[in-house]
Amino acid sequence: MLFGKLILGLTALVSAVAAFPRSEDTKYFHEPGRGNLEGHYDARYYKETVDYDTRLDTLTHMVRAWLQTTQQENIETWIAHGTLLGWWWNAKMLPWDWDLDVQVHHNTLTMLGQKYNQTTHKYKSADGTVEREYLLDVNPWIWQRVRGDGNNVIDARWVDVRNGLFIDITGIAETDPTNAPGILNCKNWHRYHYDDIWPLRDTTFEGVPAKIPYNFDAILVKEYNTKALTVTEYQGHRWNVQTKAWEKATDVPSGAQGELALEKPRVPGRYSTVETGGFFYNVFRLVHFW
């Protein structure tokens, strides 16, 4: 009798463990690997790691398609993170980046989920020589506006269905209006005041109209530190002051591919947001734009 009860108890325990969702089961977007190479592809469309030129071509047209589509559909979005840093240098992507980043307000994110989820979008380049198709895929976990288990910090993706490269789309929301009114955050610890983001500034990126946060300079300094705005050699590339472009340089060491995070992004305090760069940072900006 005791043995029988033990067996029944173990059976119930096994069933309960099997029914309880494991952390990895919550992840919506999947990549074929975890490194800086295979970790930047959508597993559904991944065939092989593309070469340098193919990656640049893919991402360039991908971001143009995203910006043009969102403008046509009156969807508010702005470039962020390493993509914003690329804009700061020359209004182009950083040539060693493996994906691009944009942000939206969480209300816009909800609308994308309701109206555009799993939609495909055709694109033709301005000269008519390039035609592509992209999938807009919205993570069903967009209702969760805090980090949670960390498996769903990316809220949506704009995916090139030819090879799986993508743009990461993240939402920002006011998650604690009682204790931190006016503070918005994404799921990856980045926090902003409303007036850090709005009113958005009109600009161009990769040759097409785009928008950037109002307080873009302080946002970049907070996220990457001032060094990212002054270093001129990185990841096998050198900044050419005459052409205003990052050019491949065989004498510049090239490590693991990734965005220009010269220091790891710092996890802010509970309600810390962006801050100004100070006197020397503003001097650097003046010299850069001069």
Image (cartoon, helix red, strand yellow):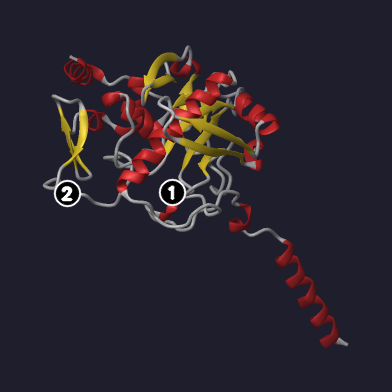
Quarter containing the N terminus? bottom right
Q: Which mark is residue 253?
A: 2
Residue at horizontal 76%, vertical 69%? 15
Q: Position of residue 202 (x, y in %)?
A: 42, 13
Q: Residue 79 in the image: x percent, y percent?
A: 43, 27
Q: Residue at x 48, y 58 (%)?
A: 32
- Report x, y in % for residue 146: 58, 38
Outermost residue on the right side: it is 1
Query: Which type of secondary structure does the marked residue at label 2 adopt?
Result: loop
In-image side of 155 versus 126 (left or right): right
Does residue 234 lie above or below 14 as drawn?
Answer: above
Where 66 falls versus 193 (above or below)?
below
In the picture, the quarter occupied by the C terminus is top left
Q: Name which of mark 1 and mark 2 comes first in the sequence.
A: 1
- Hey, which residue is sitting farthest left in the picture? 251
Q: Amino acid at mark 2?
A: Pro
Q: Which residue is mark 1?
A: 40
Residue 275 in view here: no
- Residue at disc 1, secondary structure: helix
Give the residue type at disc 1.
His
